Amino acid sequence: MSRILRIGGACLNQIPMDWDHNLKNIKDVFQEAQLNNIELLCLPELCITGYGCEDMFLSTWLCETAQAKLIELLPFTSGLTTSLGLPVRFEGQIYNCIAIIEDKKILGVYAKHNLANNGIHYEKRWFSSWPYHKTETLNIASQPIQIGAISLEIRNIKIGFEICEDAWQEDRPANHLVSKGVELILNPSASHFAFEKEKYREQLVVSSSKKFNCTYLYTNLLGNEAGRMIYDGDILIAQNGNLIGHNTRFSFKPFNILYCEVDFDSQTSSINIKKDYTNKLEEMSQALPLALFDYLIKSKN
């Protein structure tokens, strides 16, 4: 069986709790992925609800609605394996999760371990940290679904997961995935824009692919989601220490997709992209127009 897989990441410009807007973006990106014969697609962290829901994450309504929207999206995943970010309430605690879907079926739910809780992030206020090595059973639409520190085998390729801050800590999920023989790690993120962060993010993705002898796929949110944080829409793909794909940041589009074909039987890639980093003034000239444009559109001014 061939182990060449067309994988992709999508950045999305979402709005907290705007279900119609968010689901339209997700459905549109699924359609484009299917038109481009993408087999596996990684979407950003908390893309169903938006990242900036703040204390509404604590409400029962938000988690229940997010789960209902997840079920609503299943028919649109024909022929596609994808990840969808949402908050999940389980046994009285709320977790920052991704649901992994393959061809209209939920395969499992991964729950974030390392929560971002510094600067402008307050995840420990809303979410609980899921313990390493623990899995439980969650019911979604009357179906038993595994939740927790999961890894999966999809199309004969072993896949693991990290969500944003998971990857930035020394004790990270990827350390525990090596013994499972994971070959592809997906990292859906909501990583705010900061000057020169692009360089450090690329170093993280490339070094992770080398350290863990895998392909590493990272994707971020896009735009001025809720007036407080700017997301640059970064998408990065690295294989065994080589950067094999990156997109253009700060797009004014509702979403962007980056994809490439990866041979999981090959230990090396003939592609190794060398990026030219923008300086602070260039970054500011790209970030501020997007932030202002998004703010005016979303506040309906």
Image: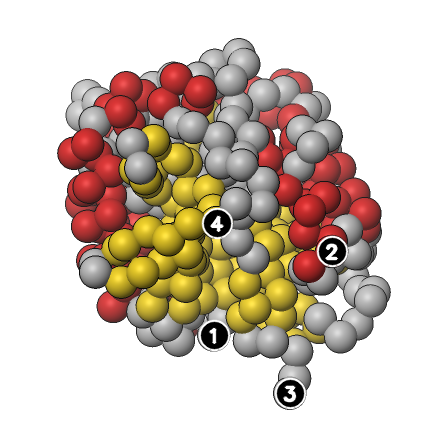
Disc 1 or 4, which lies upstream in sequence?
A: 1
The location of residue 280, given as percent across then percent down, is 66, 19
User: Which residue is outermost to the bottom?
Assistant: 1
What residue is shown at x 69% (from left), y 32% (from top)? 171
Q: Kindly report the distance in space between the C-alpha atoms of the residues bearing marks 4 and 2.
A: 17 Å
In the picture of the structure, the residue carrying the numbered disc 1 is: 37
Whether residue 192 appears in this view of the structure is: yes
Residue 19 sits in quarter: top left
Please identify the quadrant where the N terminus is shown: bottom right
**Residue 128: where, in percent of width, then height?**
43, 28
Identify the residue at horizontal 41%, vertical 56% (top origin). 146
**What label does residue 135 carry, if any?**
4
Q: Along the polypeptide, which appears first: circle 1 or circle 3?
A: 3
Dot 3 falls on a residue whose secondary structure is: loop
Q: Is residue 255 left or right of residue 75?
A: right
Measure the C-alpha gap from mark 2 to mark 1. 31 Å
Q: Which kind of residue does numbered mark 2 sit on? A: Ser
Marks 1 and 3 in Cβ contact (< 8 Å): no
Badge 1: residue crowd in 10 Å (few <14, some 14–19, many ≥20): some
| Residue indicated by mark 3 | 1
Q: Which residue position is annotated with label 2?
A: 179
Identify the residue at image location x=48%, y=49%: 135
Q: Earlier in the sequence, mark 4 or mark 2?
A: 4
Position of residue 291 relative to residue 71, above or below, is above
Q: Is residue 289 visible?
A: no
Looking at the rendered structure, the secondary structure element under dot 1 is: loop
